[in-house]
Image (tube, rainbow, N blue to C red):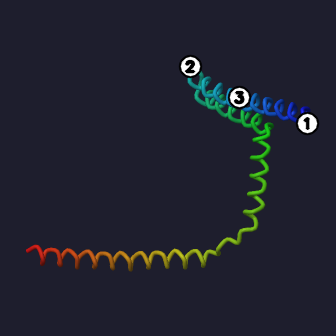
Amino acid sequence: MTTTTQETNQSGMLDTIKLLMAAGLLIGGVYGYHTYIEWSLPLRVLLVLGGLIFGGGVAMTSAQGQRLWAFIQGSRIEIRKVIWPTKQETTQTALAVFVFTLILAIFFWGLDSFLLWLTRSLVG
């Protein structure tokens, strides 16, 4: 029982170190972008992208990164199961929404005009 607890604490500490290192790489890239203004813009952008890529790579080796990757893979599988509407279905639905919105706009305009007339009639 104690061995499992120690292993969990060590892996938790290792994950924390990995995430801090990943954040440090990203912050380092952004810091380099703002510090080395005399460098050309593409080179400074590469600093930020490098920090982002290497930081993301380090973060993905942590337990949280592994869970994120598993979630992404599961999401891709679920997206493949979705039955997407055809072009005709999409057009018909968009047209129905447009017509219904137009009908409601006319109804509310008429209701507003009637209430305005009624209020002016009562107030004088």
Furthest residue in direction left, as rendered: 124
- Residue at 62% x, 31% y: name it: 45
Where is residue 85? Give x, y as percent. 64, 74
Residue 3 or residue 98, whichever sits in front: 3
Give the left or right position of residue 107, taking residue 38 as reference. left
Q: Which residue is under mark 3?
A: 20
Q: Decide: is 17 above or below 86.
A: above
Spatial CA span between label 2 and label 1: 57 Å
Identified at 77% across, 56% down, the residue is: 74
41 relative to 98 in the view: left or right:
right
Q: Nearer the viewer, mark 2 or mark 3?
A: 3
Q: Which residue position is annotated with label 1?
A: 1
**Residue 43: percent from left, percent from top:** 64, 28
Classify the position of the N terminus by image quarter. top right
Residue type for callout 2: Glu
Q: Which residue is mark 2?
A: 38
Question: Which mark's residue is nearer the viewer, 2 or 1?
Answer: 1
Mark 1, Cα crowd under 10 Å, few <14 / some 14-19 / many 20+, is few
Q: Which label belongs to residue 73? A: none
Name the secondary structure under disc 1: loop
Q: Measuring from the top left, give residue 99's x and y in whole percent.
A: 44, 79
Kind of element beneath mark 2: loop
Mark 2 or 1 closer to N-term?
Answer: 1
